[in-house]
Amino acid sequence: MTQKRLFGPEELGIILHRLACQLRESHSDFSSTVLIGLQPRGMALARALSQILAQDYGLKSIATGALDATFFRDDFRRRDEPIRANRTEIEHSIEGKRVVLIDDVLYTGRTLRAALDALHAFGRPQRTELLVLIDRRFRRELPIQPDYVGRHVDALDTEKVRLEWAEDGKLESVFLVSETPAP
């Protein structure tokens, strides 16, 4: 197994601040916006962005939530191991609101399709947007495109994007991991 570090804490900080700035430009005071992180890693990104928006822009009351789309996936019955679901925590109404779904890596689009199905069990948003830290771009199986992208990463099907988290919940590094040894 080989891994290549794509970026570390300094560049991640820049990317997260840029994404927060883009959200601020699009959503102004966030009074009609709900940030929903996809469990598990999207929720950590939603928290990080919410903290930046509070610290840099003084937006203290941003509605956030966590969504687990496990049982809405089209492949959840095909797994050999038992399914471990996370908690969905949406305490704010999404009816008529602008919802920003937040996830770490967009690859085939199937997780996001499941998330859209799961989200509509909680109401009908006025608009749904997608923010991802990493967009793999190639091998998309569904016509899903993000509205906000931290970084585009071109990778082979045999490679995986791995995010490394610190114990305090902060994202430290992003790696491109290959199961096959480098030539």
Image (spheres, rainbow, N blue to C red):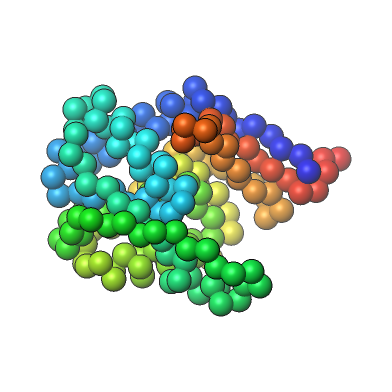
Quarter of the figure with the N terminus: top right
Coordinates of residue 173 in the picture (x, y in percent): 56, 32
Question: Residue at point 51% right, 25% down?
Answer: 9
Which residue, as the protein is rendered here, is positioned at the far bottom?
77
Coordinates of residue 100 in the picture (x, y in percent): 30, 51
Question: Residue at point 71% right, 37% down?
Answer: 3
Coordinates of residue 159 in the picture (x, y in percent): 68, 49
Given residues 56 and 106, the one toward you in this image is 56
Residue 58 appears in view = yes
Q: Is residue 51 left or right of residue 41?
A: left
Please tell me in which quadrant of the rendered image residue 143 appears. Answer: bottom left
Question: Residue at point 26% right, 54% down?
Answer: 99
Coordinates of residue 90 in the picture (x, y in percent): 27, 57
Q: Is residue 113 left or right of residue 31?
A: right
Residue 101 appears in view = no
Which residue, as the protein is rendered here, is positioned at the far top?
10
Figure check: 84 above or below 64? below
The number of callouts visible is 0
Figure check: 41 above or below 29? below
Figure check: 152 above or below 94? above
Q: Is residue 179 left or right of residue 21?
A: right
Question: Residue at point 18% right, 59% down?
Answer: 93
Figure check: 134 above or below 138? above
Quarter of the figure with the C terminus: top right
